[in-house]
Amino acid sequence: MNISEAIRIALLSLWANKLRSVLTLLGVVIGVSAVIAVVTFVNGINGYVAEKIFNLGADVFITSKLPKVVGASVRNFNGKVAYGTQNSTDTMVRGWTPSMAAIYDLDLVAGRMLNNTDENTTAGVVIIGDDIRENLLGDTDPLGKEVKVDGKVYRVVGIGKKEGKTLGQSRDNYVIMPISSWFKAYGSHNSINIWAKAMDVGAPFEQAMDQTRVILRSRRHDRVGEKDTFVIETNQSFLSLWADLSGTFFIVMIVIASISLIVGGIVIMNIMLVSVTERTREIGIRKALGARPRDVLRQFLIESVTLAVIGGLFGVAGGIGIAKLVTLAIGMPSAIKLWAVFSGLIVAASVGIFFGVYPARKAAKLDPIVALRFEL
């Protein structure tokens, strides 16, 4: 019997016993789906985390736990924004210096950015996010309109470009005011974060961080030999944190997937043993007609692998589907990697080989005379 014939018999067996086939392949499908979903999802967001969640490019760093000093400073606070009878709660109220927009890569669809005059005069002006524009002002042109932020009146001078959602949370529910106005509204004894953008990555980036460290150690009177009383973080800092979290999550999912694959392999082995029993006379006839033990062994091994690979194909499709659903649900990207697809199929085939050897060997060792006399 050639390989194509063995595969055809395996497919016919699957089709003839649909419910049994579904139950047989379920473990493999779940195991491969879990692996593919995790790999697809993790690969998709690895390059997305720092830039979209923390808004850090490769040439940006953040210094935190500082008083108000020179640089592009930022302060956040959740507050209430109102326009007429409409209001928005839990809105991110950001206090920015004018240079922060370029570092944060904020784009406007209308109006202008904050400027030095706004900061120096503690101007009551704000830039609003798309959620505020849509939910509070509707079809009204927001520019020049007055909104209340935690009870204080501010004039809208800019409208931010829609950014969508990350981890299910909207990135457009915000207002941005000059940092001087923020301190006037919420108090000047709050710690701030300082964002800085180097001229380039590599040596200029390292030099910029070194210069920042020297200036801040001097400003904060850190003694020689003592640790910094502040923290400088880059996108690599956050990516390392994400790598640790995603690595742990990946290991957990691999363990779960392995258990599913083992269970699926055991089910495949049991089904193949049942198949050997059901086809004992067929095996006897084949051997009587000249089939060698290795021919029978190969036949049942190919059938076992075919079962597992079909489960793997459904698992790959299911894993990619799960990842895409997660993408639609929480706005995070997913990236399909061909190596992950091939790895999933190879793992499935390996399960079929490992758990198919015993039934195949049992079939190959059957005595043709005993097999011909066998009756169910």
Image (cartoon, rainbow, N blue to C red):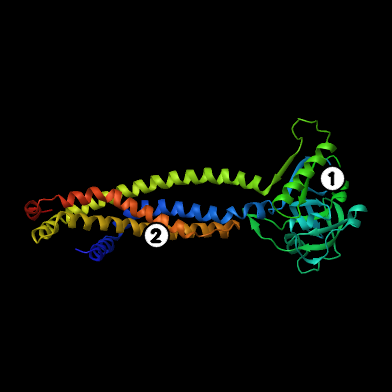
Image location of residue 136, percent across then percent down: 76, 61
Viewer-side residue, 45 vs 11: 45
- Can the viewer see residue 305? yes
**Between disc 2 and disc 1, whose residue precedes?**
1
Please name the residue that numbered disc 1 is placed on: 186
**Which residue is rendered at x = 89% and y = 53% of the image?**
119
**Which residue is rendered at x = 36% and y = 54% of the image?**
348
Residue sticking out furthest to the front: 203
In the picture provided, is 37 more to the left or to the right than 20?
right
How would you rate the neighbour count of disc 1 (Cα within 10 Å): few for under 14, some for 14-19, many for 20 or more?
Answer: few
Image location of residue 351, percent across then percent down: 33, 50
Q: What element carries label 2?
A: helix
How would you rate the neighbour count of disc 2 (Cα within 10 Å): few for under 14, some for 14-19, many for 20 or more?
Answer: some
CA–CA distance between discs 2 and 1? 56 Å
Image location of residue 115, percent across then percent down: 87, 58
Viewer-side residue, 96 vs 124: 96
Question: Are dots 2 and 1 in contact, CB under 8 Å?
Answer: no
At label 1, which amino acid type do we have?
Answer: Tyr
Image location of residue 139, percent across then percent down: 76, 69
Foreground mark, 2 or 1, reads 2
- Can the viewer see residue 66? no
Q: In this view, does 32 lie above or below 16?
A: above
Find residue 314 and name its label: 2
In the picture provided, is 369 more to the left or to the right than 74?
left
At label 2, which amino acid type do we have?
Answer: Phe
**Could you tell me how many numbered marks the image carries?**
2
**Which residue is rendered at x = 26% and y = 58% of the image?**
303
Q: Is mark 1 on a helix, strand or loop?
A: helix
Viewer-side residue, 175 vs 212: 212
Find residue 340 and name its label: none
